[in-house]
Amino acid sequence: MQINQNKVVSMHYRLTLDSGEMLDSSFDRQEPLIFLVGHRNVIPGLENELIGMESGDEKSIRVAPEQGYGVRNEKLVQSVSTERLPDDMELEEGKALRFQEQDGQIIEAFITSLSDDEVTLDLNHPLAGEHLNFDIQVVDVRDASAEELEHGHVH
Ligand code: ZN
C-alpha cells in the first residue's frame, strides 16, 4: 500500500541539522513514529515527500526552513526589562520561558542573554531557519479507521 492522504504511516526517522548535530532518532528508540497523513500531524515539507512510498522504502529528505519550522525573524528577538517579568521567574541563559498570550495561546521564548536589568528573549522556534535532514524508513502503511479520520489523529 502506498502512502497517501488519510493513510496511517509507521516510519523510522533520524533528524540531523546541517551542523551534523543529530536531534532525534526513532531507530534508537526502536519504536517508529506513527501518524495520520494529511492532518497536519507532521511538518508539510516532510509529509509531501512521503507520498507514494511503500513499506520498506527508504529515503533522505531535506526540508527547507519555509517547509519546516519557518525562517528566523530577527524582530522576534526582544529585550525586556527584568522588572516586567514576574519576581519568581528563574532567569538563566538558554532557558526557555513560557508566556500565555491574551487569547490563551502559549508562547515559548529562549533567553539569549542576560544582564542585571535586562533580558534578551528569542521568540523564534528553536529550529527556525534550520534545514532539516531526515533519513526515513517506512515500516508500515495502512488505511485509517473512520474514527481516526474524524479525530485527525492515530488511535
Ligand atoms: Zn482521537
Image (cartoon, rainbow, N blue to C red):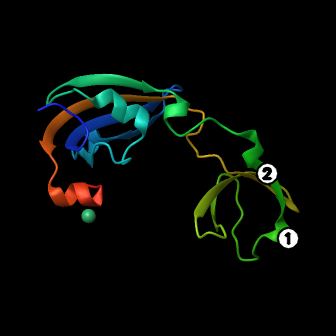
Residue that appears at 77% across and 44% down: 75
For residue 54, say whether it is visible. yes
Res. 154 visible in picture: no
- Residue 113 is situated, as x and y percent measured from the top left of the image, at 77, 50
The residue lying at 13 percent from left, 42 percent from top is 142
Q: Quick check: 118 left or right of 149?
A: right
Ligand 1 closer than 8 Å to label 2 CB: no
Considering the image in quadrants, where does the C terminus appear?
bottom left
The three-letter amino acid code for the residue at tag 2 is Gln
Point out the frontmost of discs 1 and 2: 2
The residue pinned by badge 1 equals 83
Tell me the number on the disc at residue 69: none
Residue 108 appears in which quarter of the rendering? bottom right
Residue 17, compared with residue 103, is above or below; it is above
Position above or below: 144 against 64: below
Mark toward the start of the polypeptide (1 vs 2): 2
Element assignment for label 2: strand
Residue 67 point in image, percent of width and height: 49, 33
Q: Could you tell me which quadrant the N terminus lies in? A: top left
User: Is residue 127 shown left or right of residue 95?
Assistant: left
Q: Secondary structure at mark 1?
A: helix
In the rendered image, the vertical position of residue 54 relative to residue 86, given as above or below: above
Q: Which residue is mark 2?
A: 78
Residue at 66% x, 37% y: name it: 72
